[in-house]
Image: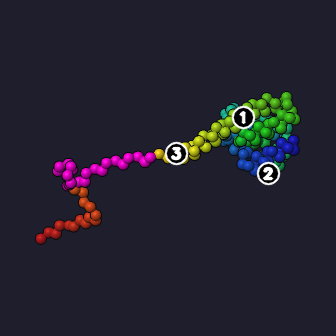
């Protein structure tokens, strides 16, 4: 369990862990939570709320094998009953460590999170390739400059439409008419 709690502490330091009932609920509703952890000695009301959060956010939740005090110590609090991991890679690693200790209890969840993590990694790679292609597209091969458009005739000159006054050039000053 020590390595699991160590991984929970790393997730907290990385800013990828929400701790407490309200932040976990908000992360689940925003579909940012990837895994919800519930302490083994959490109250039944807390367990019920965690299952509702998991349903709302379509997130797996696990009743972990450590107490509120142990979980709280890993995240820098006196006690903690609920925590949500918001990064899929950390959630997958945490669940894989739990599955090593108790494969029948956590194995299926670990496999599901592994699939999600692989899909997320594939999307990241595709995004990176796309951004790289966009950067390369800015460096186009040399091409001849485009032909300049023909100049329009000046106002008031030959070929200008009749009835239009030429536009003033330079500084224009407007004077008020003086009344005699």
Which disc is residue 6 wearing?
none
Q: Nearer the viewer, residue 161 or 49?
A: 161
**Which residue is at a point 38% across and 47% down the rendered structure image?**
147
User: Which SS class for mark 2?
Assistant: loop
Q: Locate residue 150, reporting x and y percent.
A: 31, 48
Q: Nearer the viewer, residue 73 or 168?
A: 168
Quarter of the image for residue 90 reads top right
**Which residue is at a point 60% across and 40% down the rendered structure image?**
130
Is residue 102 magenta-colored?
A: no
Neighbours of disc 2 within 10 Å: few (<14), some (14-19), many (20+): few
Q: Nearer the viewer, mark 2 or mark 3?
A: 3
Q: Which residue is mark 1?
A: 118
* First in residue order: circle 2 vs circle 3: 2
* First in residue order: circle 1 vs circle 2: 2
Range covered by the magenta-colored residues: 144-165
The alpha-carbon separation of the residues under discs 1 and 2 comes to 31 Å
CB atoms of marks 1 and 2 within 8 Å: no
Above or below for 158 versus 169: above
In the picture, measured across the screen, residue 27 lies left or right of residue 139, that is right
Q: Main secondary structure of the magenta part?
A: loop
* First in residue order: circle 3 vs circle 1: 1
Which disc is residue 141 wearing?
3
Work out whether residue 67 can be spotted.
Answer: no
In the picture, measured across the screen, residue 150 lies left or right of residue 141, that is left
Across the whole image, how many numbered discs are drawn on residues? 3
CB atoms of marks 3 and 1 within 8 Å: no
Q: Nearer the viewer, mark 3 or mark 1?
A: 3
Quarter of the image for residue 132 reads top right
In the picture, measured across the screen, residue 127 lies left or right of residue 155, that is right
Q: Which residue is mark 2?
A: 76
Q: Nearer the viewer, mark 1 or mark 2?
A: 1
């Amino acid at each position: 369990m020590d390595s699991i709690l160590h991984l929970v502490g790393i997730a907290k330091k990385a800013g990828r862990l929400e701790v407490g009932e309200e932040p976990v609920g908000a992360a689940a509703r925003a579909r940012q939570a990837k895994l919800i952890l519930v302490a083994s000695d959490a109250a039944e009301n807390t367990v019920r709320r965690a299952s509702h959060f998991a349903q709302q956010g379509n997130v797996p939740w696990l009743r972990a094998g450590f107490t509120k005090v142990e979980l709280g110590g890993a995240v820098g609090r006196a006690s903690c009953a609920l925590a949500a991991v918001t990064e899929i890679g950390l959630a997958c690693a945490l669940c894989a460590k739990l599955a090593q200790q108790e494969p029948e209890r956590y194995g299926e969840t670990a496999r599901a999170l592994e699939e999600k993590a692989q899909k997320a990694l594939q999307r990241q790679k595709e995004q990176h390739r796309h951004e790289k292609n966009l950067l390369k597209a800015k460096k186009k091969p040399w091409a001849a400059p485009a032909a300049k458009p023909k100049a329009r005739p000046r106002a008031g000159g030959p070929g200008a439409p009749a009835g239009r006054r030429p536009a003033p050039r330079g500084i224009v000053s407007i004077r008020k008419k003086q009344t005699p």
